[in-house]
Image: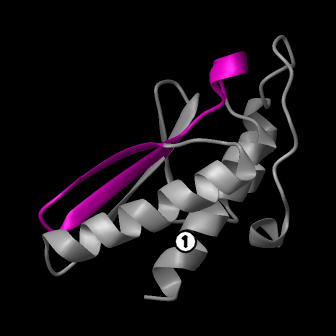
Amino acid sequence: MLANKSCVPCQRGAPALKNEEAHNLIKKTPDWEFLDNESKICRKYLFKNFLEAMAFSNKVGEICESEGHHADITFGWGYCSVLFYTHKIKGLHENDFIMAAKTDAIFNKI
């Protein structure tokens, strides 16, 4: 289960996931979508109001900080969008899917 894994440090120059690998992993995070020629993954979460979206955003930020793998987070009234990709390799790594699963787990606890 991806949510139970921890992120491992990724070195600059490490290869990004191949398309087949990324497609296999996104099946484990089915509400996420590929962006930018499948080099990023994103999901938009919906909430009842601004405070719920902000609280979720803060929880995602906390798990990102604890895992050392940071998301691009955008939130506003009733929504929070989370985008993952590995900046060092300018593409996707297993860490991105681990974090997507952890983000889903946070949302599922609400």
Q: Residues within 10 Å of mark 1 (few under 14, many from 20)?
A: some
The residue sitting at 72% across, 42% down in the picture is 22
The residue sitting at 62% across, 50% down in the picture is 65
The C terminus lies in quadrant: bottom left
- Relative to the observer, which residue lies in front, 66 or 70? 66
| Vertical position of residue 26 compared to residue 12: above or below | below
Relative to 83, is 85 on the left or the right? right
Magenta-drawn stretch contains 80: yes
The residue sitting at 58% across, 41% down in the picture is 70
| Vertical position of residue 94 compared to residue 5: above or below | above
- Relative to the observer, which residue lies in front, 63 or 109? 63
The N terminus lies in quadrant: bottom right
Relative to 30, is 81 on the left or the right? left
> Which residue extends farthest bottom?
109
Res. 23 in view: no
Relative to 100, is 76 on the left or the right? left
Colour approach in the figure: one colour
Percent across and percent down for residue 91 are 65, 25
User: In the image, what residue type sits under mark 1?
Assistant: Asp
Residue ID for mark 1: 104
Range drawn in magenta = 72-91
Percent across and percent down for residue 71 are 52, 43
Percent across and percent down for residue 33 are 48, 49
Relative to 83, is 2 on the left or the right? right
Corner quadrant of residue 29: bottom right
| Vertical position of residue 70 compared to residue 78: above or below | above
Magenta-drawn stretch contains 94: no
Check disc 1 and report its element: helix, strand or loop: helix
Percent across and percent down for residue 11 are 86, 21
> Which residue extends farthest top?
13
Q: How many marks?
A: 1
Res. 19 in view: yes
